[in-house]
Image (cartoon, rainbow, N blue to C red):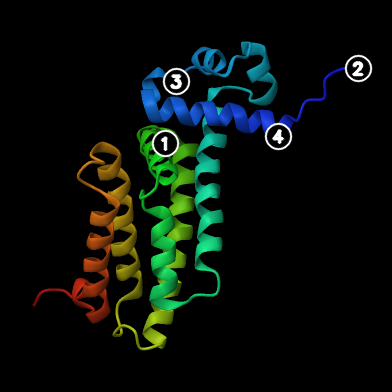
Amino acid sequence: MPKVVDHDQRRREIIDVVWRLLATRGMAALSMRAIAEEAGYANGVLAYYFADKDALLRAAHELVFAATNERIVRASGDARGLSALRAVCGEIMPVTEESLLEARIATALWQRAMYDEDTRAASTAAWDEWRRLIERHLKDAVTDGEIDSIDLPVAADNVLTVLMGFQVTASLAPESMTPEHQWSVLEHSLRQTRTGRSCRKER
């Protein structure tokens, strides 16, 4: 009987190879030939699942954000306010082997996003989703009296910028940007947010 192939599983296996190559060799070393060799497939097999490298990179990019969002849903549960915000941040921050790998993949793809409209649009959409989520939890924190009234969009952008900074610095220098240090930096930012100091203009 012919072998039954799980096509979804094979697509994921190919994307896992792309993740591994991006994280260890970077965008410059990525080619359909390199992906096929690493996966142990012929080039024709890759073409069956992905029309070209662009399609493969888009799928890899989307899966990074999807994996993070799945963890966010599980981690935040029914929490709200600052507890929910910390849960969200903890899944975006590169504080585990899994999330550090995702950060390395994301930062490799950001270079591509500078000139590729599809990659830029995917990154922007993901950041917008996280920004709205962060702002919602900050709004709940204001309602619940955990923090003072603040400029919510600015405060949300402040948190998101800190998180994106972790993605870069932890990818480049994980020995100094440790999980413990990331949490300390985040808590410092949240302490400023609680009093609105990070959102007030100097007079």
Q: Which of marks 2 and 1 is nearer the N terminus?
A: 2
Q: Mark 3 points at which residue?
A: 30
The residue that mark 4 highlights is: 8
Q: In this view, does 52 lie to the left or right of 98?
A: right
- Quadrant placement of the C terminus: bottom left
Q: Which amino acid does label 3 sit on?
A: Leu
Q: Indicate whether 168 appears above or below 24.
A: below
- The residue carrying pointer 4 sits among few (fewer than 14), some (14 to 19) or many (20 or more) residues within 10 Å by Cα, namely few
Mark sitting earlier along the chain (4/2): 2
The residue under label 2 is: 1
Would residue 55 be seen by someone viewing this image from the given angle?
A: no
Mark earlier in primary sequence (3, 1): 3
Residue name at image x 39 percent, y 47 percent: 96
Q: Residue placed at 35% from the left, 33% from the top? A: 111
Numbered disc 2: secondary structure: loop
Amino acid tagged 2 = Met
In 3D space, how far apart are the residues under numbered discs 1 and 4 (Cα atoms)? 21 Å
Q: Mark 1 points at which residue?
A: 105
Residue at 43% x, 41% y: name it. Answer: 102
- Going by the numbered disc 4, the residue's amino acid type is Asp
Label 3 secondary element: loop
Residue 23 horizontal/vertical position (percent): 40, 30
Q: Find the distance from the CA under tag 2 to the CA under tag 3.
A: 36 Å
